[in-house]
Amino acid sequence: MTLKCTADRYGQVAILFHWIAALFIVLLLASGFRAVGTLDPAARLLMLRFHVVAGVMVGVLTLGRAAWWMFADRKPAPVAGPSALSGRIAAIVHALFYVVILGMAASGIGMLALAGAGAVLFGGAAGELPDFWNYLPRVPHGAGARLLVVLLLLHVGGALYHHVVRRERVLARIGLFR
């Protein structure tokens, strides 16, 4: 396998970007939803510390991935089998991933900055975490999390459909089931 993509497969760099980001996105969603539902302040603090660090990592990975596609590599050709509608849906879902992930990063940073929570989370400042619902970026952050869940379901469902039902071996292109 090569570092860059070929006409029919993703390269090692693209595969690493994909799977590392996928893992951290799932962990981000789990830690974010868990933090919202946690009443124990110490547990919430730990969840949010992880959540913020993982969120920054996903934001950086997403920007790095976009730069990789713009300056260093080209994506493989689309799978020949899907209909034009299926290809269009896939393109929209992939584009929305970038928009939602970067919007989530921006709203998360906005919440931290407006609430002054960084000092409590990472600076060792005494005090309780603020009620993030009092800050405007909380609304798009929460909506973005729910949209991200929907996008993940569409993405995974579409990949499984095309790999298992249509036998187009799309998972082999991204490093699974050679």
Image (cartoon, rainbow, N blue to C red):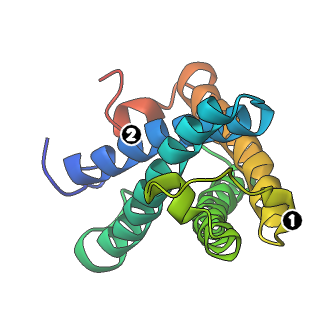
From the viewer's perspective, tell me whether residue 2 is left or right of residue 50: left
Per the image, label 1 sits on a secondary structure element best described as helix
From the viewer's perspective, tell me whether residue 12 is left or right of residue 168: left
Asked if marks 2 and 1 touch (Cβ < 8 Å), the reply is no
- In the picture, the disc for residue 167 is none
**The residue under label 1 is which amino acid type?**
Asn
Per the image, label 2 sits on a secondary structure element best described as helix
**Above or below 73: residue 172:** above
Q: Residues within 10 Å of mark 2 (few under 14, many from 20)?
A: few
> In the rendering, at what x and y percent does residue 70 appear?
35, 78
Residue 80 visible in the displayed image: no
Residue beneath the point at 72% across and 37% down: 33
Frontmost residue, 27 versus 2: 27
- In the picture, the disc for residue 19 is 2
Residue beneath the point at 66% across and 63% down: 100
**The residue under label 2 is which amino acid type?**
Trp
**Above or below 28: residue 126:** below
Q: Quadrant of residue 114?
A: bottom right
Frontmost residue, 116 versus 57: 116
- Quadrant (top left/top right/bottom left/bottom right) for the N terminus: top left
Frontmost residue, 170 versus 70: 70
> In the rendering, at what x and y percent does residue 129 appear?
68, 52
User: Mark 2 or mark 1: which comes first in sequence?
Assistant: 2
Q: Which residue lies under the disc numbered 1? A: 134
From the viewer's perspective, tell me whether residue 123 is left or right of residue 143: left
Residue beneath the point at 50% across and 46% down: 49
